[in-house]
Every structure is written in structure tokens, then in C-alpha cells.
Image: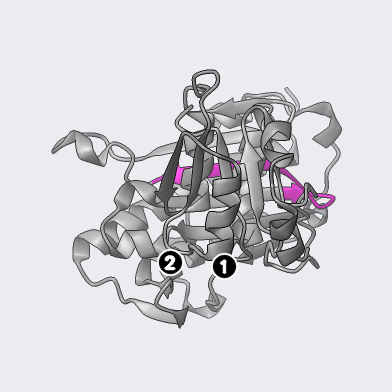
Amino acid sequence: MASPALLMRVVAAAYSAAEKAATIVRNVMAAGDLGIVEKTGANDLQTKADRLAQMSICASLARKFPMVTIIGEEEVTADEVTEELIEDGHCEEILKKTCPSQYTGIKEEELVIWVDPLDGTKEYTEGLLDHVTVLIGIAYEGKAIAGVINQPYYNYEAGAGAVLGRTIWGVLGLGAFGFQLREVPGGKHIIITTRSHSSTLVNDCISALNPDSVIRVGGAGNKIIQLIEGKASAYVFASPGCKKWDTCAPEAILHAVGGKITDIHGNSLQYNKEVKHMNSAGVLATLRNYDYYASRIPNTVKQSLVP
């Protein structure tokens, strides 16, 4: 049997790296000392879990795939990595899947991996644990083509003895796995948006869409999961706060099940290694009915957000 294509090996390794990171995230919380540092302000935090999880993911993947470009959210140096942070396993189930033919010839140096070791840090520090995700997105030719989202605290409200955490993954052309795809009941317009980065612009944009209800939660990974599980119909964020490592993995999974994510102007997001990290023209994502929402974004909002 031919050995699995590079892309499938990278996704399989990312799956295991995300699970290891989730364990780190839970262990730091359980130990009680979060080691919180403010980066740019009270809404932009970093914890010991962010730092250790990123070191673990990046070092583990770099060791297996030395030519791949890996871009992580946190500024941490590789020389702090200890052996116990390295994950050398991979998910066998992923290796058994057939790589989509358009990706079989990819070389290591053509891939860019975008890592958010702990998406929803503010919520993590406040105990809103179901908002937290570990995100590993894989891009090729500037496009998000595969992604892994781990929810370290999935099921945490089920009580003592419940198995915590789950990992969702997807590859364009293959599909997405680890969850049950659902759509919002027909005719319902449920908008999901930011919890901690609200602004007049964000709220004006949502009002213009005339939603039946608005859900405010943390974490881009979490918001995309709400879309694919039928809890929300559109993720709308008319603000420049979101970064490439927030959207790469969720985008690949959303696109793998036929959804769509763009900036507020309708431009696709770019993930090549030279791209600026900020999604400065905001985010609009849906599982279905993208055009309905896109056509209702006010021009005043578009003019305020420059790509």
C-alpha cells in the first residue's frame, strides 16, 4: 500500500498535537495558576496554557515536518521546549482516508500552518470553558484546505466522570468529521458574534441584518462550531479584531461542509505566509444562505472596514 499523502500525515499529526494541547490547557486550569499576562490590554490576554500549548503544537509539528511554515499566535521561543511537550503520535483514522487528488502532490515547503493554541483566552480565564478551542489550520497556495478544532472542555457540564473534549477535523474535498452537521431551522436568522470585542460598528451591522436573535460568545472556533451544529445561521464580526490563526482551521472545516467565510466585503481570506495576520475587514460566515446576509451588510459598515 502506498504511504499516505503528506497532507493527510500533517492533518493526522495536527489531530494528535491538538489533543495534547487540550490536555495541557486542562492541566493548567486544574493546577490553578493561569499565569495571566496582558498583551495589548484587558481583552487581549495570554496564559501559561496559551504559551505551553503553542510550544507543544509548533515544536511537535516542526519536528515531523521541518520544511512547513508554522505561524502561531503567541511569541514563544523554541528553546524553552521540553521533551514532555512533544507529541509524536498521529490519528490512524485520518491516515486511512484518501487524500483528495488535487492535494496529493503537495510538498512540505508549500504548506503554511496557522496555530491558535487557545482561542477564547479571555473566556478561559473567566471560566466560560465551553467557548475555548485549540485551532490548527493548514493552508496551501494561500487557501485554507484543512483544519483541526479541539474543544478541550466539550461535555464539561455533563458532570463528574464525563469524558471531556472532542476533536473536529476536515479537509476540502473530503469532508469534515467529529460532529453532527445540522442547519438552523428554515427561516430563522440567528446571528452569532463577539462577546468581548463589541463596538458601535459591530452592533450597527447586526441591527441591519434584523436577526431573530443574537448570540454573543467568545472564540472564532467556537462560533464556527455553532454554525455547523445548527445553533446559529451567520457569524458576523464587523471589526478588525480577528486574526488568520483564528479563522484558518474553522474556515477549512466550514468550507469542507459547503459553508462560506469571507471578510465583510465578500473577499476570501488569504493564508500565505507573507500575508498580514489581521483580518482587518472583519468576518462574515454562514453554513447556508451566505448571499442573504452579505447583501444586507450596510455600506457604512463596509466603508469603515478597509481590507
- The magenta stretch is 139-151
Which residue is denoted by mark 1 in the rendering?
Answer: 73
Which residue is denoted by mark 2 in the rendering?
Answer: 50
Main SS of the magenta part reads strand
Kindly identify the residue that appears in the image at 53 percent across and 72 percent down: 74
Looking at the image, residue 207 lies above or below residue 183: below
* Residue 104 visible in image: no
Image x and y of residue 160, in percent: 13, 38
Element under disc 2: helix
Distance in Å between CA atoms under marks 2 and 1: 9 Å
Mark closer to the chain start, 2 or 1: 2
Kindly identify the residue that appears in the image at 55 percent across and 21 percent down: 187
Q: In which quarter of the image is residue 256?
A: top right
* Residue 96 visible in image: yes
Kindly identify the residue that appears in the image at 75 percent across and 69 percent down: 276
Looking at the image, residue 300 lies above or below residue 155: below
Please rate how many residues cluster around mark 1, counting C-alpha atoms within 10 Å: few if below 14, some from 14 to 19, many from 20. many
Please state if 286 lies on the left or on the right of 151 as rendered: right
